[in-house]
Amino acid sequence: MQGDAYDPPQEPLDILHQDHEVLVVNKPSGLLSVPGKGTHLSDCLLARVQGAFPEALLVHRLDRDTSGVVVFALTPHAQRHLGRQFEKRQVKKGYVAVVWGKVADKAGTVDLPLVVDWPNRPKQHVDFKRGKPAVTDWKLMRHEGGNSRLRLMPQTGRSHQLRVHMKEIGHPILGDPFYATGAARRAPRLMLHAETLRLRHPDGGQGMRFRVPVPF
């Protein structure tokens, strides 16, 4: 978990899809998407993917403790094409999270602008003057004891967006070392998983959907 010594899982690459332009993998929780500062943080999903696919190029990333679907480009054309889809918010992302407490409503939207909290980076916080727009739709799946399982659908892609937005509505994601406190922090992992990703293939524009079952 973030803040502890970095000890990423050593399981082999879990490849969901591979063709001449696109590679899609399942990132385990606890593994950085890209290298951190210092050689002790060099092991990451990008390095492992490039070990097997030297031509692989970064398109997007997930937080270290978030698991789920990540797409890589296998050509510069694919990287540009996929990058534009992310920039224009044409990629549809679906997450599942277990959050602290019983969420009362069945669904809702969180619309709170975010900016990096410089003295405490990489943490983010809400800032109505300097923050960039950040919007998250959510739906209640079910209550689990005193907690709630939610489906989260970010409309923007800000750093830590889902984690901050859930904290701001009083329901931090379980196991979040940055934004949860007390009993809400005590979980085997950050209970956030990128379950689905929908995009258009860079060669021809065909719609594609990738899914990784929730591991918790």
Image (spheres, grey):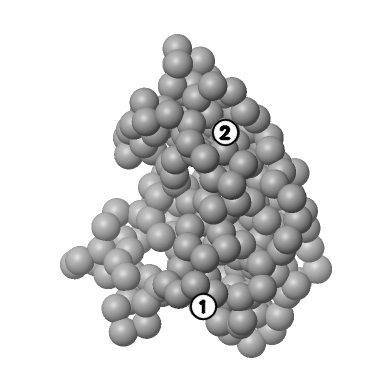
Q: Quadrant of residue 9?
A: bottom right
Name the spot of residue 113 as percent of width and height, x first. Answer: 31, 61
Q: Nearer the viewer, residue 23 or 137?
A: 23
Name the spot of residue 119 as percent of width and height, x first. Answer: 31, 84
Q: What is the residue that sits farthest to the top in this orientation?
A: 204
- Name the residue: 46% across, 68% down: 36
Name the spot of residue 161 as percent of width and height, x first. Answer: 44, 60
Q: What is the residue that sits farthest to the bottom in this orientation?
A: 182
As helix, strand or loop, the secondary structure at mark 1 comes to loop
As helix, strand or loop, the secondary structure at mark 2 comes to strand
Are there few (<14), some (14-19), or many (20+) residues within 10 Å of tag 2?
Answer: some
Which quadrant of the rendered structure holds the N terminus?
bottom right
Disc nearest the viewer among 1 and 2: 2
**Residue 129 falls left or right of residue 176:** left
Q: Quadrant of residue 144?
A: bottom right
- Name the residue: 57% across, 33% down: 23
**Residue 153 falls left or right of residue 86:** right
- Name the residue: 62% across, 42% down: 52
Q: Nearer the viewer, residue 136 or 215?
A: 215
Name above or below for residue 154 compared with residue 15: below
Whichever of labels 1 and 2 marks the residue nearer the N terminus, that label is 2
Are there few (<14), some (14-19), or many (20+) residues within 10 Å of tag 1?
Answer: some
Inspect the image, locate mark 1, and give the three-letter code of the amino acid beneath it: Phe
Query: Can the viewer see residue 140?
Result: no
Name above or below for residue 119 compared with residue 147: below
Name above or below for residue 152 compared with residue 43: above
According to the image, label 1 marks what residue? 178
* Res. 23 mark: 2
Q: Nearer the viewer, residue 133 or 44?
A: 44
